[in-house]
Amino acid sequence: MRFAVALLSLLGIASIIGTVLPQNQPQVNYLVQFGPFWSQIFNFLGIYDVYASGWFVAIMLFLVISTGLCLTRNVPPFLREIRSFRENAQEKSLAAMKHSTQLEAGLSPEVAAQYLSVQGFTTKTVSRQDGSVLLAAKKGAAGKWGYIFAHAALIVICTGGLIDSNLLLKIGMLTGRIVPDNEAVFAKDFKPESVMGRSNLSFRGNVNISEGQSADVVFLNADNGMLVQDLPFEVKLKKFHIDFYDTGMPKDFASDLEITDKADGSKIEQTIRVNHPLTLHGITIYQASFADGGSDLNFKAWNLNDPKRQPLKLKATSMRDFPLDIGDTKYKLEFDQFTAMNVEDMSMPSEKSGGIQSAVNDVRSVVQENKRFTNIGPSIVYRLRDAAGQAVEYKNYMLPIKQDEDYFYLTGTRTALDQPYRWLRIPTDKDGKADTFMALREFLKNDTLRRRAVADSAAAAPQEIRSQFVQAAENTLAIFAKGGYLALDEFVRQNIPQQEQEKMQGYFYQMLFGVMNAALEQTIREYALPQWPQSEQRNRFLLHSMDAYTGLTEYPAPVLLQLDGYTEVRSSGLQMTRSPGAALVYFGSFLLVLGIFFMFYIREKRAWLLFSDGHIRFAMASARSERDLKKEFPQHTLHLQQLLKDLNHDRK
């Protein structure tokens, strides 16, 4: 019993994990969430598909066999006990009971039987060879059915779980009849041994369908590969609907579906939403998620090897790959999901001081006290892969995002999924655009324009040191234009004695800020940009621009992409399940509730009255109602004595 309880506790813990942690998700999701080490450990333990893991199935199978043997052994004695009145009780054993007393003679067995019947007892009278008469009574004997129902419930529930646990699928994989595919991308490319027929007893699979598209299969996760499950119908997504809370969080999403039966060609139209599924041919279609379905995207693209401030226009589609040739170097742009809304807690510290907060896209997220959730606009994730197969992932936000007092265009980069993004922050000018920064970048790449900016800044220097100032300022600005702060720091380390480096760095930075201020003024005039008088905002913009310019010198791509527009296409994530075991689980749950009710609310009590030798022995017993008997036995004794007096009052 202790071992069985321990196994049930383990199943309970595993069920909690399976409820809290989304199951059967792509491996990359778990890699991002847990990191490379723990994701592999959890995958080995079967945490990502708890209910179909080998150890979970083995425990259920053991409990079915063990509990089945227990019932087989104990049900016959229980049934005999339920039917039995224990009419073989002897006076000695009755007298030894805790609740036992002797009554005066004068009460007939018939009257006593009638009294006990009124009290809810079922009675049986037995005449013995010694002339004594035993009246045996029982009440609540059906309580033992609670044990039977509870144990049977465990068998039924575990059997239902075994049916829906892909047990047959795992057996097929062990025998080699079913082989998961880890290479195919499209359903048509899967091998026959990786395609499950429509007669498959149970399955749980997922499919994403874009608006206007259809699907007649779902994909099943199986070990390190995938299987394709053929469906008896075709599902077409006509329209996807989504509503949001004021905070930007998803409130409700639904799919308008058109389902075509493959057998007779009949069509039905149905709208499904969260917690309102549709069941056809024993297959239940759930609204599970939503995602990007291949949106049209417009980008501004700056070639970082070219100083021109004017970007090229680039069109792409999310969830697709595109070739990108820059000079003689070939790349591939791999676009991931486009997200039209990103809700973020903007009450937290900014990216600069604490790392930009992860976008809150989960429909289960809620607004909490002291948090300020804000929609920061569309974003796109993409990867730039070189000819050697090495890729860097980028995340770009379309709209400028406020951090502290100013707004920035943000682009994050990372080389591995388990790494946080490193952010490039392009500052906006007073009109909320990146034009001034890009013009300043082009200005710094031009030797002639840099010398002009140095000349302007040197005009205020004393005549006797002006030439030295011009030379120092030109060198400083040239070094910065080549590699930003990093190049300037490297120059100081290599050319200045160590004891003077800190002092000279401060000198160079002061000079650089003054020259850059003149460069910004020259940039505004050179490119006919809107005038920007000296102010604290302009000074902050200049400092942010110097940071961003330095970041661009280390940017791990030859091109900078900025999302500029889009036409959204949504896809609906549908989960389709065939779960014949679910009915057994529901029935088992009913048996469990019934068993608990019987065990806790139907309490077995037994009573005996032995009429012999001019006296009456009255006794009561119960397996689990000792506290009740402490009250009931004296009451029944008193009532029987009173009944005896009332029936014999004429004899006195």
Image: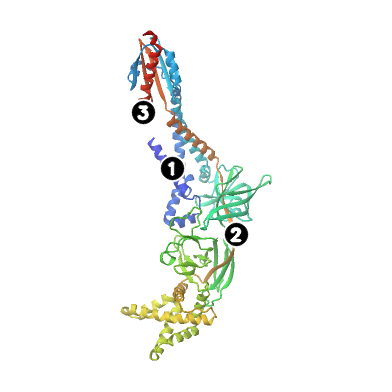
The amino acid beneath tag 2 is Val
Query: Crowding at label 3, few (<14), some or many (≥20) Cα neighbours within 10 Å?
Result: few
* Residue 302 picture quarter: bottom right
Name the image quarter holding the C terminus: top left
Give the number of callouts: 3
Mark-to-mark CA distance, 1 and 2: 41 Å
The amino acid beneath tag 1 is Gly
Q: Secondary structure at mark 3?
A: helix
Identity of the residue drawn at 55% across and 42% down: 579
- Looking at the image, residue 624 sits to the left or right of residue 412; the answer is left
- Residue that mark 1 sits on: 12
Looking at the picture, does residue 623 appear above or below residue 103? Answer: below
* Residue 84 picture quarter: top left
Identity of the residue drawn at 47% across and 32% down: 149
Q: Secondary structure at mark 2?
A: loop
Query: Between disc 3 and disc 1, whose residue precedes?
Result: 1
- Residue that mark 3 sits on: 627
